[in-house]
Amino acid sequence: MSNSRAISSFFFTDCGDGQFSCKQCGKVRKQTPGTGCTNLISHLAAKHPGYTETYDESQRTHEQSLEAHGFVDKRTMEIFKWMEWIVARNHALSEVDDLLTRSLAAVKPISSKTLMRYMRHMAAKVGARIAVDMNGQFGLMFDGWTSGTTHFVAIYGIFTKDGILSQVLLSISPTEYGQSAEAYLEMIDAVLELYNKDSAMIMFIVADNCATNQAIATRLGVPLIGCASHRFNLAVCRYLEDYKPLIDQVQTLCIQLRYPQQRSGARPPHALQVAEIQRHSVVVDLPDVGSLREDP
C-alpha cells in the first residue's frame, strides 16, 4: 500500500498557506502543516474512488506523466492557455509582459522568456511526434506567397496513419536563396532534416503546375500532382476572358480610388479592391458584377 504523503503529492498541488489543489477536479482543500494528509486523502476517497489503483499503476509504468491519466496540473494548463492565446490571435510573445493584458487575463501571468522556453520544448515534442507519424513514406504539398519584398513558402507533409489521411504543416519560412528549383530543394532538405527525414522518402509532391515545380519533381524523381486551387484559378481566368474590358475598367477605377480625395464617397456599401495578380494565375474579386454598368 502506498504511503499517504506520496499519494497526496501525486494528486495535489501545493498552493501555499496550507492550501492544496486537486489535480483531477481543481477542488482546493486545506491541510495544516505538520498534521498529516488526512483531509487530502479523505477528499480522494470521497470524490475519486480508485485513486490508489491509479497511483500504483503510475508507479509501475516508465512514463509517469499526468497526461497518461487524463488530467494535468493547473500551472501546466495555464501555460498552455497563454501559448494558445498568443498563437491563435497572432500576438507577439512580448504581449504576455503587458500590464494591461495581465490585468485582464484570468490565468496566472507568465513572462515572455518563460513562454518562449515552453514553446521551444513543445515544438520539439510535437516535431518528434510528427516524425514518428510520417514514418518512411510521405508526400509534400507546398505553395508560396509574397509579402512586401519577402517570399514565403509553406510546406505540408501528407501521410496516412491508421488508415486516416493527415496533412500536417511542417514549416512556414522565407526563401533565402531565391525561387529557383535548386533553392526550393535546399529548403525542402533543410525542413526534412528537422524531422530526421530525407528527400528519398518523398513519394509525390502537390504544387502549382509551373516550370519550377516540374523541375523539382524531375530532380526528385516523383510525380507532380497539380494543385486543385491552381487549376480552379486557371478555369476562372478562362471564364472571365469575355468580361476582360469590364474588369479592366474596374481595375482602373480601383487605382484611381487610391487617392483620398476620390475614394471618400466610395467606401459604403462596397470596398473596392485592386485585383491581386499571382504568378501563373489571376484572382479577381468583384462584389457584384451584375450591378456594374459600362459608360456609353
Image (cartoon, helix red, strand yellow):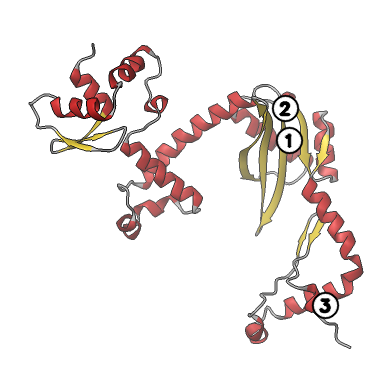
Q: Are marks 1 and 2 in contact (CB under 8 Å)?
A: yes
Question: Image quadrant for the C terminus?
Answer: bottom right
81 versus 130 height, above or below: below
Q: Are marks 3 and 2 in contact (CB under 8 Å)?
A: no
Q: Choose mark 1 or mark 3, whichever is in front.
A: 3
Left or right of 274 in this view: 75:
left
Quadrant position of residue 266: bottom right
Residue where numbered disc 1 is placed = 185
Which comes before the other along the chain, label 1 or label 3? 1
Residue where numbered disc 3 is placed = 249
Counting from the top left corner in percent of width and height, residue 181 is at 78, 40
Counting from the top left corner in percent of width and height, residue 42 is at 18, 27
Amino acid type of the residue that numbered disc 2 sits on in the rendered structure: Ser
Q: Residues within 10 Å of mark 3 (few under 14, many from 20)?
A: few
Left or right of 80 in this view: 233:
right
Q: Secondary structure at mark 2?
A: helix
Q: Nearer the viewer, residue 51 or 140?
A: 51
**Which residue appears at 18% of the width and 36% of the height?**
29
Left or right of 155 in this view: 14:
left
Which comes before the other along the chain, label 3 or label 2? 2
Left or right of 173 in this view: 108:
left
**Which residue appears at 28% of the width and 18% of the height?**
52
Q: Choose mark 3 or mark 2, whichever is in front.
A: 3
Q: Residues within 10 Å of mark 1 (few under 14, many from 20)?
A: some
191 versus 152 height, above or below: above
Q: Nearer the viewer, residue 188 or 31?
A: 31
**Which residue appears at 70% of the width and 74% of the height?**
272
Residue where numbered disc 2 is placed = 199
Q: Secondary structure at mark 3?
A: helix
Q: Nearer the viewer, residue 185 or 85?
A: 85
Amino acid type of the residue that numbered disc 1 sits on in the rendered structure: Leu
Quadrant position of residue 255: bottom right
